[in-house]
Image: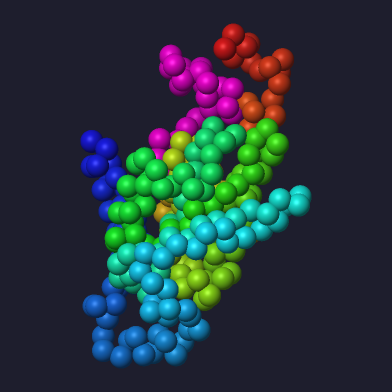
Amino acid sequence: MKSHCITRIALGLTVTLGTIGCQPLLLQRPGALTSAASAFTLTSAAATPAGAVRHDVPFTTVGGQVLKLDLYYPTTPTYQPLPVVVFIHGGSWQAGDKGDIQFGSDGLILKELQARGFLIASVNYRLAPGALFPAPINDVRSAITYLQREAGTINLDPQRVAAWGSSAGGHLAAMVGLTASQGGGVTLKAVVDNFGPTDLTQESLYWQGEMAMVRDWTALIGMSKKALPAWLKRY
């Protein structure tokens, strides 16, 4: 089941970013590469080895904290410039790191996307309770803005950007997608919320064994125990 889910995520992003409004280079007319090269000042595919990784690329500084991202180049660079998937790690909004993408099911999805021709940018964001909502959303927006601004240097297509996150990262990916019109020009072609929470308002949505989520999201918004609704105070 897990492998089928991973394949569906990768295939969905491939269809959305890889075929809408573009064609693989092998299908383009003769001379298309030459005209493209003259139209853009880009780092050539040959300059970035297949499967290369760039760690700790700074994309913004907030309150003296430098936020960084890692770039994972495709092992099979099918498209030029590269479609990019922005990965947002989980960790209850309070923990985790951009390096988490290398492990578990996220690591399998990473490899699948690299093999399908995607550039993946794994981003760090400020964590609760030190940084409260909407700080992490703004940080992800800043990362996307940076990537689109530096598209020529990084060799990515600023019009083919997707956000993918797991758990709390899935929630943030969905929020960035839903508030794109408020995000200072941030545009996304696709959003993948991989088992992230989507409704934090109803008691019926919290099943036995998942009540830790209540503590997690109240930490994100800085709500004290005394301020919680009555039905939440018992957890």
State which quarter of the image contains the C terminus.
Answer: top right
Answer with left or right where residue 127 lies relative to residue 43. right
**Total labels drawn:** 0
Taking the image as drawn, is residue 161 in sight? Answer: no
| Residue 203 image offset from top left, x and y in percent | 51, 17
**Which residue is found at the position 38% from the left and 79% from the top?**
46
State which quarter of the image contains the N terminus.
Answer: top left
39 or 101, nearer to the observer: 101
Answer with left or right where residue 160 lies relative to residue 116. right
| Residue 233 image offset from top left, x and y in percent | 62, 12
**Which residue is found at the position 40% from the left and 40% from the top?**
194
Above or below residue 122? Residue 149 is below
Residue lying farthest to the top in this orientation: 234
**Which residue is found at the position 41% from the left and 48% from the top?**
102
Above or below residue 1? Residue 33 is below
Answer with left or right where residue 19 lies relative to residue 137. left
85 or 200, nearer to the observer: 85
Asked if residue 43 is among those painted magenta in the image, a careful observer would answer: no
Above or below residue 132? Residue 227 is above
Taking the image as drawn, is residue 26 in sight? Answer: yes
48 or 186, nearer to the observer: 48
Above or below residue 127? Residue 146 is below
Q: Place residue 218 in its image quadrant.
A: top right
89 or 33, nearer to the observer: 89
Asked if residue 212 is among those painted magenta in the image, a careful observer would answer: yes
| Residue 21 image offset from top left, x and y in percent | 35, 70
Residue lying farthest to the right in this orientation: 63
* Residues in magenta, as a range: 192-217
